[in-house]
Amino acid sequence: MATFLAVPLKQTQEVELTKPLRSFIQNTFTQVEPDDYNHAINEFSKLRNLMIAKSVDKHESALEVLYRYYDQLCAIENKLPIAENQIRVNFKWRNAFDKESLFGGKQILGIASGAYEKVCMLFNIAALQSQIAEVQNHDSDEGLKTSAKYFQNASGIYGHLKDIVLSHVQQEPTPDLSPDTLNALSALMVAQAQEAIYRKAAADRMKEAMVAKIAYQCSDLYSDAMKLMQLASLKELWPKDWIPLVACKQAGFHGMAEFYQSCVAQQSKSYGEQIARLQKANELLTAAQSRGGAAFAFKTEQGRVQRELQAAKKDNDFIYHDKIPDLKSLPTIGKAAIAKPAPFPSKPMSENFTDLFEKLVPIPVYEALTAFENRKTQIMNTEIGRLREQTQLMNSILASLNLPAALEDLSGKKVPQSVIEKAQQIKDIGGIQYLDKLMNELPELLQRNREILNESIRMLEEEEASDKQLREQFKERWTRTPSDKLTQPMRDESMKYKQILDTAINADRIVQEKYQKHKQAIELLSKSPAEIDKALPSGGGAQASESTGVVKKLRKLMDDVETIKAEREVIENELKEAKFDMTSKFFSALASDGAINEEMLSMGELDRIYGPLREQVNESLRKQDSVMAQVQPANLEFCQAKASDQSGAQREAMLKDLAAGFDMYMELKSNLEEGTKFYNDLTPLLVRLQNKISDFCFARKTEKDELMSDLQKSIASQPTGPAPPPPSYQNPSATTESRAPPARPPPPQFSSAGPSPSSSSSSQSGPPNTQSGPPSYSSAPSGPPIGAYSYPSGPPPQYMPGKISGTTSSTTTNTSRTEANHPSAPPSSQPPAQNYAGPGQQSWGNAPYPQAGGGYQGMPMPAMPSGFNPYNPYTYSQPQGYPMQGHPQQGYPQQYPGQGYPQQQYPQQGYPGGNQQYPQQNQWR
């Protein structure tokens, strides 16, 4: 049965999507009601949770859920951008090959990035495709077809990821997302797809020549995958059975290619070539077996090859007698590259995908529409401003000439009708009290907006200061993105609003100055006609009459002025109400070019609509210049015709002030209403900015807390360094030496025959023997002589816990010990001395004794016995078989694996029982 490898899935956890998405929609799309998208947001959150739950199912229905979630991520990429400085949702994904080791690179990576989420989703889609391909029934045609399809799809996805991962993941990725890993996985998947095709071809009994080419291509693909998987940076990443299995398949499919090519040679009656290729196939399958071990998947094929080889040799030996050529001289087997990485799909992966946020325009389109609206507003305000500025200039000129009031006050005895109408208009609006009300509200609105903006700036500064402090404290371990790289757009927006508020404050000051200058005239116009008449000085009458030509001319010019004003109101309304449909144009540009040239599209459409209106504005300004050029000489002639006296001059001056006061009232009313509207419209924009900054700071605080927790855990788990050496009074070797018992006399020697030693050295004499009498033994070895080998009395030394300074070991001692413990060593010519001392004691003669570092010369110092206590050195356990003197025998604790000297095996040399352990010597009494 075929054995395929499936890529493990990356693991993630649930995240909070509802609040960040709703907040972004509310703060960004000002013309959209956030509640309209609550259902879509909830469905998107459920889809991600379903993706996590369904990933463990190795079925195509689970793959469909992953497709839908990935497609939805792509659909909202331009509408709801998930990033550190926009919608901040931190996606955490674990390394798919995490072995929970302390080494091997970063195992969990969390980034607030929709692009990172897409990369991880593509990895899991390819991994699930490989798992579905693995569990297919590979004994059926349909199962092999499905496996080949999914392996090729997975190869294409991993190849696509290799090219984009570094641009999509701005931090160092986990090992499973490195380009080298993805390249190796892509090569492995396409090799397995070729293997599925080979197995189908072999099962369908295709022509041997074609099967040989498919198998040889399969071997070549596995060879490429093996090279990529054996890179130094990846060797420790893969499961332990992956590389042996890939190496096994590389050799195995090469062998099968040779086998099928041998069938081609047999059909062409090239029996020598047949045998040569069968021999090579057998060698390759044997190599595959040694590489794969228990994972060897060519047992049936190997048996077939061996049978065919045996039969071919027999037939050639008895019948054909064909010469067996050298394999190198034979033509190379061709390759049939059928399996290839599938191209990455450009359309949605899910067949029935529907965008949950279909009505929400993409951010590029929304930004283009916003920029277009700004351009439109700028053009509209510019043209309207030109009209209003010229209208104010015209009114100021007429007011300075006391027109048209002078034409209505020829008698100088009653209030001109135009003044009464203007006064009534002001009273209908609310009089001066209305202006006072608006002016008193402006400072409150301004203060409210400044407090919101200042609080937003304060939060940004505090977050950046905290980040800088922690970055200076933890240095390179503080791995998150610096605040200044994320907050720059929000800082720019804050500075923009700050400049807007500063400009508005200057405008408010100018309005206040104008109000104070014309306050007296506005107050008089706010009164009744009788009060205005009483306040006006009486005039002496005028010489000019209604029938004079100059009066008629001035009246006609005043009518022209009113016509100009009426036309300008119409033009202003047309400028404000101009309609544009730029959404479809921007969508078309985004779909065709992938980007929007907003300036080119906007300016073309604005010129088309506003071009004729601009021409009307210019014509109105030219008409005003013509009319005013006629008004001034006509008014001069009118003034000369009037009978002038002192009272008439005062009356005319007051009428001029009233006319200027009316014009200023209307201007101040417009300015104050626009200012109030401006502050009220600015407040929600500042609140949205404040909410955005608040969400950002909260997400950064959460990220900071998580990173702090990780750093604290890593710091706590780091070793503090090697332990300091103990004081001299706690030195166990010195303690052992100080309490070492007197040395015993040498034990009796056993004779042995053998050649004389090649070299010897002097040994250091031990201290005088304070004990009386030689040591005795409870029993002695029986049986024939030991022969060429001698064994010291007592058990073989395993561990010497003490040390005696200033001692050295002799060559003879080492030689004797080597012979005693290694029966294969050449025999010694002289019987070595057997005067062994007890553990921790010096020895007499040539017997080994402990050295300055503990243990015996030339032997590694074993680990400290578990019974040793450095704070109570007089109560430790002796090695097994070495009881403390004067005390009952105490057993030595079990040695650690690989430590001490194991019981030696001795060859049969006249000793009954053959190859048995040498009998243990009696203990010291």
Image (cartoon, rainbow, N blue to C red):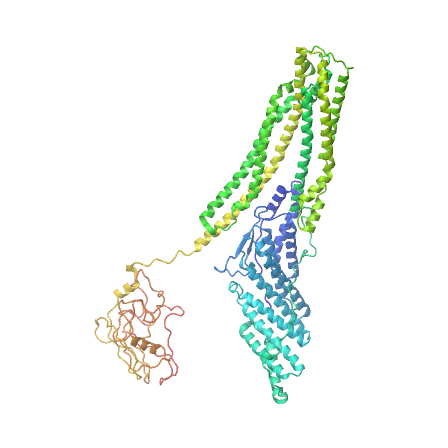
Q: Is residue 749 above or below residue 555?
A: below
In the rendered view of the protein, which quadrant contains the C terminus?
bottom left
Screen quadrant of the N terminus: bottom right
Say above or below: 670 vs 578: above
**Could you tell whether 585 is left or right of 108 in the image?**
right
Where in the figure is residue 757, as x and y percent of width and height? Answer: 30, 80
- Observer able to see residue 328: yes
Whole-percent x, y for residue 365 in the image: 67, 45
Res. 404 visible in picture: no
Q: Residue at x 69, y 32 (%)?
A: 384
User: Can you give x and y, in whole percent of width and height, for residue 307 in the image?
Assistant: 61, 82
From the viewer's perspective, is residue 554 above or below residue 796?
above
Residue 780 image position (x, y, % from top left): 30, 80
In which quarter of the view is residue 510 placed? Answer: top right
| Of residues 476 and 147, the one drawn nearer to the viewer in this rendering | 476
In percent of the image, x 72 and y 21: which residue is there? 631
Looking at the image, residue 844 sits to the left or right of residue 293; the answer is left
Number of disc labels = 0
